[in-house]
Amino acid sequence: MATSLHISISEYLRTTYRPDREYVDGELLDRNVGKWDHARIQALLGAWFYNHEHEWNVIVATELRVQVSPTRVRIPDVCLVSNGPHPPVLVEPPILTIEILSPDDTYAEMTQRGNDYIRMGVRTLWIVDPLNRTGHVWIDGAWTENAVLTVPGSLIKVDLNTIFGQIDGAS
């Protein structure tokens, strides 16, 4: 949900919000905060990527501000970036962005975010849906379901059945 407060991008970038908010064309946007499955999937994906950072020459980050345009900042649940130093707010396209659906999120909202990431230059986007135990990858402007999510041209992949199994087994 958007707040009615309009602020400049510079004010947004120097302000800390708890929880953090996205910034779209002068407006602060509240993010749906995940519940157990969302939080657990985020932790498991973060751990999975962390364990493969050296092998894949990437760095994993969660809830990192990504300035997708001069007037927009999105905050993916998980993202992968190339190895090396990075600024506090990412301005170069991540290798991968992952959004984990919260109960109040919609695919229409994810598509809006996806379009922002694509315009920025992100090549691979994933959605993980804890409720339906599915994953989707952005292909040619549409979400396509797949149980094994990959980053084309790389070794990066996640078998979501393994991730979901860790949640189901821990319940």
Image (tube, rainbow, N blue to C red):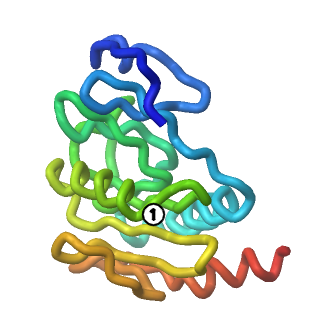
Please tell me whether residue 129 is drawn above or below residue 22 in the rendered image: below
Horizontally, residue 142 falls left or right of residue 106, namely left
Q: Is residue 36 above or below residue 147?
A: above
Q: Nearer the viewer, residue 17 or 1?
A: 1
**At x 52% / y 31%, what residue is drawn?**
20
Looking at the rendered image, the quarter that the C terminus falls into is: bottom right
Q: Is residue 86 visible?
A: no
Reading the image, the residue beneath label 1 is 53
**Could you tell me residue 52's position as x and y percent?**
49, 70
Residue 27 horizontal/vertical position (percent): 35, 25
Q: Position of residue 112 (x, y in %)?
A: 29, 53
Give left or right: position of 32 versus 113: right
Q: Is residue 117 visible?
A: yes
Task: Compare residues 117 and 90 and report the one nearer the observer.
Answer: 117
Question: What residue is at 50 percent from the left and 44 percent from the top?
Answer: 63
- Quadrant of residue 40 within the rendered picture: bottom right
**What's the residue at 70%, 84% (across, down)?**
165
Q: Amino acid at mark 1?
A: Glu
